[in-house]
Structures are given as C-alpha cells and as structure tokens.
C-alpha cells in the first residue's frame, strides 16, 4: 500500500514537472539567439538589462551573423566629426526608432526617437581625419587614406563588435580620395597631389585582401584624370558601373566587364549649378544642389530631373533649421530611403549656434516616370562648436 502511494506521488510529481510552462530564460542558447536576432537593435540596450545571459548574447558578434543569415539586419548611419582643431576625430552612429515621426518645429524635436552614440576611434598617429575616405563592406567600415609622407593606411571597423583592425596598405599613399564598393572590390580614385588621376586608381579585393591597379582607356579618360592641382571627385555605383565626377558636366564611368575607365557627358538641369552631395537608391542617382533642389538622374536620357513633392519646404521655411542658411553635409541611402544631413547656423546674442540636423525621405516612382518624395522624419542630432569639421562621407551599414 505504501509502495503504491509512493509510486503515485512520483507519477504526479513528474507530471507536474512536465506540465510547467517553458519560460524564455529556459530556452536553449541557439533558439534564444534567433529570437533576439529578430528584434530591432533599437531595443538591445534595454534588453541587455534583463539578465547576464541576455547581455552576453546581445554583446556577442555571433548575433549579428545570425541577423544577416535570417535577413533581419537594419540600416545604421555612421559619420565623423572633429569638434576642435586640437582634438582627435569622433565617430558617431545613429539609430532611429522604428516608429519615428516627422517633427514640424525644428526646436521642438521629439525626444527619445533616435539614439546617437560615439564609437571608440582607432588610435593611430597616421590616421588623420582629413585624409581618409570611408566605405561600407557588409557590416564593416573601411577607412582608407593617409598623407603622402605616411604609410598608405587602411583601418577596418567591425560595426557589430565595435572593434578595429589593420587592413592591407595601399599601393600609393593618398589623402582625400574617394572609394566605392562594387562586386566584392573597393575602388579608390583621386586624391590630392600632382600625380595623374588615373595613376592613383587602385582596387582592393576583399576576399584576398590584395591591391591592384586599374588602367585608363582612351584620350577622354586621360583628359578627365590628368590634373596638376588638387583634384576632388565624387564616386558612386549604378548598375555595375562606377561613376566618378569632378564637375557637374564631366563624368567618367568604369565598365566592370572591360575593366577600364571611359568618359560620358551628362546634360545638366537648368536650375543646377553644383551638386553638394549624391547617392544611389535602387539604381537611381539622387543629388542635392546649391539651389536647394533635390534632383534625380535619368540614366537613359542622361538628364537630371527634380524630385517632386519632397516636402523640403517644411525645412526651408524655418529660420533656425533652413537648408538655405546652412550647408548640406551628405545624402545617403538609408534602407531604400533618402537621408539628408545638413548643418544649420543660428545667431543668438551675436553668437553663432551650429547644429547638425537629419531628415529622412521616402521615395516613389509615379505615372509618367516622375520621382516623388515624402518627408517622414526630421530632427536635430547634436549641437556643435563653431570650429567643428564634418569629416569624410556618411556610411550606412546593415547590422
């Protein structure tokens, strides 16, 4: 009788044990990691406070590999500032909440709808901020460039772990060049000096981590590339071709199949005098001009056209955050949307107050082939001293 009661008690105990609901903390490591990888990175700082186990998983580079494998990566903006001439540069990363909304008043920005965090910079005496160019490769950022008398440096930031490492040195030392990533390779062009432009063109194979040179093709390319003075260009990739610009009317493109550089002449828009910044979204080139007009470039006709309904008047009409009274710093592709960064200047009691502002615009193609934009979000990121410098280009990585 006693034995029967003991067996019954054991049976009930085992039954109750199996009937207990599973908690998230009791899940295996791999399953929990896949769950966390599906949550927006915006929530990671708060989730890290839940437990030491959560903190460990969210701090591991492995979770960013998982996010990439299951397709849950999110865009993240990086940009560099030097707040004073005697200070080293600062690298910032910007995260926006998934439910961000447009702010109509430039001084009454919505608190808490974005996170701006300083990232530890690479401590190296030859990594001068004015001299490098930056390019995104997956979840990494390559900083490329150095003064002519310094080693041709390459520094690589792993954005998932915020750790730095050395990359392979370039073949030629250069400063203020431009770079673009295409089909597993980084192409670097231009820079300051008295060498021919194309003599400075080189390519880094990401897989082998080796540099090689890129030859020019034709007299027209040599005419564009040869300069006895400082040469400042812009670069971007459209449909497998690299476009380089040193003037609104003077473009060169590199055909990847031929492996050479050729020149094409582009018709400009009547209202466009100069392009402050440009980027590519779904093989469409977008630019912002000194006439405060957002433009897009039609590849077939080689003509610039105005982006309609871009809601820029919401920004242009405000004295304290007016694009016309400041400077456009960069345009970037932020997950298929256009991100605009600019500086504003406001005078208060004879003192200049400078701010870096950011706006996000959704784009769509409408009937008749017109591009339309709608402003979704605008905010002030930070206030900067009068002597600050905006360094290199903005970079968007997916992590």
Image (cartoon, grey):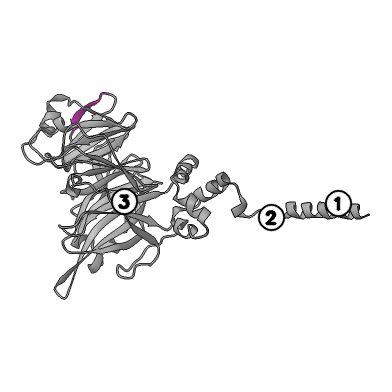
Tell me the element at label 1. Answer: helix
- Towards the viewer: 253 or 272: 253
Residue receiving disc 3 = 78
Q: Quadrant of the N terminus?
A: bottom right
Q: Secondary structure of the magenta portion, mostly?
A: strand
- Towards the viewer: 154 or 252: 154
Q: Residue furthest bottom?
A: 349
Residue receiving disc 1 = 7
**Which label was assigned to residue 21?**
2
Q: Residues within 10 Å of mark 2 (few under 14, many from 20)?
A: few
Q: How many numbered marks have been drawn onto this rendered protein structure?
A: 3
The CA distance from mark 3 to mark 2 is: 43 Å
> Is 260 part of what is drawn in magenta?
yes
The CA distance from mark 3 to mark 1 is: 65 Å
Q: Decide if residue 237 is in sight here.
A: yes
Give coordinates of residue 240: x percent, y percent.
31, 32
Q: Residue furthest right?
A: 1
Give coordinates of residue 164: x percent, y percent.
31, 45
Q: Residues within 10 Å of mark 3 (few under 14, many from 20)?
A: many
Q: Residues within 10 Å of mark 1 (few under 14, many from 20)?
A: few
Front tag of 3 and 1? 1
Give coordinates of residue 86: x percent, y percent.
15, 58
- Write down the quadrant of residue 243 in the picture: top left
Q: Decide if residue 312 is in sight here.
A: no
Mark with earlier residue (3, 2): 2
Front tag of 2 and 1? 1
Give coordinates of residue 291: x percent, y percent.
19, 54
What range of the chain is rendered magenta? 258-264
Q: Residue furthest left?
A: 228
Front tag of 3 and 2? 2
């Amino acid at each position: 009788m006693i034995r029967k009661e003991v067996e019954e008690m054991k049976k009930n105990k085992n039954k109750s044990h199996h009937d207990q609901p599973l908690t998230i903390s009791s899940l295996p490591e791999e399953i929990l990691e896949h769950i966390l990888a599906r949550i927006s990175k915006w929530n990671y700082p708060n989730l890290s406070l839940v437990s030491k186990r959560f903190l460990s998983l969210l701090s591991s580079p492995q979770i960013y590999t998982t996010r990439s494998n299951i397709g849950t990566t999110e865009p993240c903006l990086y940009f560099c500032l030097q707040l004073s001439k005697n200070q080293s540069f600062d690298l910032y990363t910007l995260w926006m909440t998934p439910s961000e909304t447009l702010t109509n008043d430039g001084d009454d920005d919505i608190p808490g709808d974005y996170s701006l965090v300083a990232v530890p910079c690479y401590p190296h005496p030859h990594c001068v901020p004015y001299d490098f160019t930056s390019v995104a490769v997956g979840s990494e950022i390559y900083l490329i460039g150095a003064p002519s008398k310094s080693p041709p440096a390459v520094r690589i930031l792993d954005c998932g772990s915020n750790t730095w490492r050395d990359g392979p040195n370039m073949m030629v030392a250069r400063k203020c060049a431009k770079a673009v990533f295409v089909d597993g390779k980084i192409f670097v062009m231009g820079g300051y000096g008295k060498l021919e432009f194309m003599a400075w063109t080189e390519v880094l194979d990401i897989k082998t981590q080796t540099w090689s040179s890129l030859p020019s093709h034709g007299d027209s390319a040599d005419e564009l590339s040869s300069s006895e003075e400082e040469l400042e260009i812009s670069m971007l990739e459209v449909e497998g071709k690299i476009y380089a610009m040193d003037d609104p009317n003077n473009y060169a493109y590199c055909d990847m199949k031929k492996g050479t550089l050729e020149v094409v002449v582009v018709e400009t828009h009547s209202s466009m005098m100069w392009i402050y910044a440009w980027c590519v979204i779904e093989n469409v080139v977008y630019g912002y001009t000194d006439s405060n007009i957002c433009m897009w470039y039609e590849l077939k006709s080689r003509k610039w056209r105005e982006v309609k309904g871009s809601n820029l008047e919401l920004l242009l009409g405000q004295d304290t955050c007016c694009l016309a009274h400041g400077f456009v710093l960069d345009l970037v592709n932020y997950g298929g949307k256009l991100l605009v960064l600019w500086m504003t200047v406001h005078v208060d009691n004879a003192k200049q107050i400078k701010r870096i502002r950011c706006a996000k615009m959704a784009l769509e193609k409408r009937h008749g082939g017109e591009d339309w934009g709608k402003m979704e979000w605008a905010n002030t990121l930070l206030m900067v001293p009068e002597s600050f410098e905006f360094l290199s280009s903005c970079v968007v990585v997916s992590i």
